[in-house]
Amino acid sequence: MQSFDLRFTRRAALAAAASAVLGLSAPAFADKAPSGKVPVEELMAPNALPDIVEGKADAPVTIVEYASMTCSHCAAFHKDVYPTLKKNFIDTGKAKFILREFPLDPLATAAFMLARNAGEKRDAVVDLLFAQQKNWAFVDKPLDGLANVLKQTGLGQEKFEATLKDQQLYENVSKVRDRAAEKFGINSTPTFFINGERYSGEIPAADFDKILSEKAKS
């Protein structure tokens, strides 16, 4: 059985950084037009980990993002676009937002495992890790950096190490990623589904506003 190795090295961290720059993460900007569509009922079928929904459950627009914690484009979305999206659509009941795990490397898997440790506050931890990505994802000792950032949430070292040794959690994060790859053909991050229509790469706030406004009317 595979388990997460706490001895994550600087070489692996640099490899994660390179993958974000050289193509495992999606191009910086998405096409405005969707690149495909999947049935909403299949997209919303139960996963190995429960969805954490931001917004009203009956909102007319459903946004699903598949992200990797070490993806710089994902971090840019959560820093530059998501606050506007939340203010204009999620908080007003027009859309609900679901982030799902699609780790591109072991460090991203570790970060998602630790975020899941926060339960319903997972998304707040995800936002924190994206905001401080440079302080843990691409440093000489990434796990030390990750632990230091998460101390802001009250997570101690003992719980930190125990979470990363949780085989079931490791497998469930991997299952979410594997199902997305197999069922929906996802191979890069961020990838968004808006009412089942697929958009790859970052979507600028103005484009998101246009897409969501049209969806909310239909």
Image (cartoon, rainbow, N blue to C red):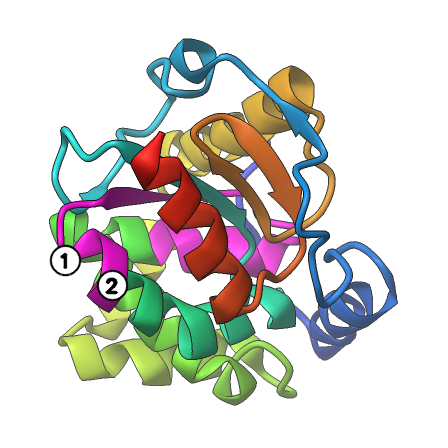
Gap in angstroms between the C-alphas marked 1 and 2: 7 Å
Residue found at x 41% / y 81%: 131
Marker disc for residue 91: 1
Task: Residue 130: tell me if it is visible.
Answer: no
> Which mark is nearer the camera, 1 or 2?
2
Q: Magenta span has 211?
A: no
Residue at disc 2, secondary structure: helix
Instruction: Judge from the rendering whether residue 71 lies leftward or rightward of residue 187; answer left or right.
Output: left
Residue found at x 25% / y 55%: 89
Quadrant where the N terminus is found in the figure: top right
Instruction: Judge from the rendering whether residue 1 lies leftward or rightward of residue 111; answer left or right.
Output: right
Quadrant where the C terminus is found in the figure: top left
Residue at disc 1, secondary structure: loop
Measured along the vertical axis of the image, is residue 108 above or below residue 83? above
Q: Which residue is mark 2?
A: 88
Residue found at x 62% / y 16%: 183
Q: Position of residue 156 (x, y in %)?
A: 20, 73
Measured along the vertical axis of the image, is residue 185 above or below residue 112? above
Instruction: Judge from the rendering whether residue 131 lies leftward or rightward of residue 97; answer left or right.
Output: right
Q: Residue pushed farthest right? A: 22
Q: Residues within 10 Å of mark 2 (few under 14, many from 20)?
A: some
Q: Residues within 10 Å of mark 1 (few under 14, many from 20)?
A: some
Mark 1 and 2 residues: CB-CB less than 8 Å, in contact? Answer: yes
Q: Which residues are magenta?
A: 87-114
Q: Magenta span has 109?
A: yes
Residue type, label 1: Asp
